[in-house]
């Protein structure tokens, strides 16, 4: 199942855009990049908060950082294609979180306060293990915690079981 809602609404007069994904398979991430690029080009993203889960992070995280998601794609698409081509389908199913960490670590602005900039602006949905309960994280104590939260949201629970967020 797939769902996205980009209609703006507001909470306490702050516009909110949602990039919510509930489905099996991340093949629709490219659609979120297109929507994110449109939002970047047409809205004042300084005034918007973003809620994302799974592949929705590929659009919402750059937007929360003040960047165009399309630029993330141009920066990292080649790295992803090379990585996945070298591993094959089976290798990708048993991939580790470290490749994804390096992508976000290289892409996110290096300034020390990016986690502060994203706190209260970026809301990331993660699933905790073993309870499989949902948690929305919106406060990030460090850049490192921001990156691991993104990875926790985009990971495949049964593939990355060893890397799943623990409650």
Image (cartoon, rainbow, N blue to C red):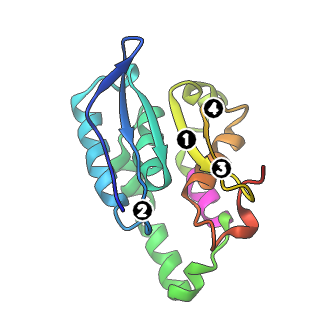
Residue topped by disc 3: 133
Q: In the figure, 37 relative to 44: above or below?
A: below
Based on the displayed image, in which of its 4 quarters is residue 146 positioned? Answer: top right
Residue topped by disc 4: 115
Estimate the spatial distance between the alpha carbons at disc 1 and disc 2, rounded to whole Å. Answer: 16 Å
* Residue drawn at the location 41% of the way across and 52% of the way down: 21
* Residue drawn at the location 47% of the way across and 83% of the way down: 85
Helix, strand or loop status at disc 2: loop
Quadrant holding the N terminus: bottom left
Residue topped by disc 1: 124
Estimate the spatial distance between the alpha carbons at disc 2 and disc 3, rounded to whole Å. Answer: 17 Å
Nearest to N terminus: mark 1 or mark 2:
2
- Mark 4 is surrounded, within 10 Å at the Cα level, by few (under 14), some (14 to 19) or many (20 or more) other residues, namely many
Residue topped by disc 2: 23
Q: In the figure, 12 relative to 80: above or below?
A: above
Estimate the spatial distance between the alpha carbons at disc 2 and disc 4, rounded to whole Å. Answer: 28 Å
Q: Nearer the viewer, mark 1 or mark 3?
A: 3
Disc 1 to disc 2: CB gap under 8 Å? no
Disc 4 to disc 3: CB gap under 8 Å? no
Estimate the spatial distance between the alpha carbons at disc 1 and disc 3, rounded to whole Å. Answer: 14 Å
Based on the displayed image, in which of its 4 quarters is residue 145 positioned? Answer: top right
- Mark 1 is surrounded, within 10 Å at the Cα level, by few (under 14), some (14 to 19) or many (20 or more) other residues, namely many
Helix, strand or loop status at disc 4: helix
Helix, strand or loop status at disc 3: loop
């Amino acid at each position: 199942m797939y769902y996205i809602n980009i209609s703006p609404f507001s909470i306490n007069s702050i516009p909110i855009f949602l990039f919510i994904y509930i489905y099996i398979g991340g093949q629709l991430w490219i659609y979120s990049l297109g929507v994110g690029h449109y939002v970047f080009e047409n809205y004042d993203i300084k005034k918007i908060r973003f809620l994302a889960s799974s592949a929705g992070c590929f659009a919402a995280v750059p937007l929360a950082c003040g960047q165009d998601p399309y630029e993330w794609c141009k920066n990292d698409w080649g790295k992803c294609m090379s990585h996945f081509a070298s591993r094959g389908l089976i290798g990708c199913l048993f991939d580790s979180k470290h490749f994804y960490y390096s992508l976000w670590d290289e892409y996110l602005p290096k300034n020390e306060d990016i986690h502060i900039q994203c706190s209260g602006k970026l809301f990331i949905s993660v699933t905790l293990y073993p309870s499989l309960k949902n948690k929305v994280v919106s406060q990030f104590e460090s850049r490192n915690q921001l990156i691991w939260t993104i990875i926790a949201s985009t990971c495949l629970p049964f593939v990355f079981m060893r890397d799943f967020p623990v409650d």
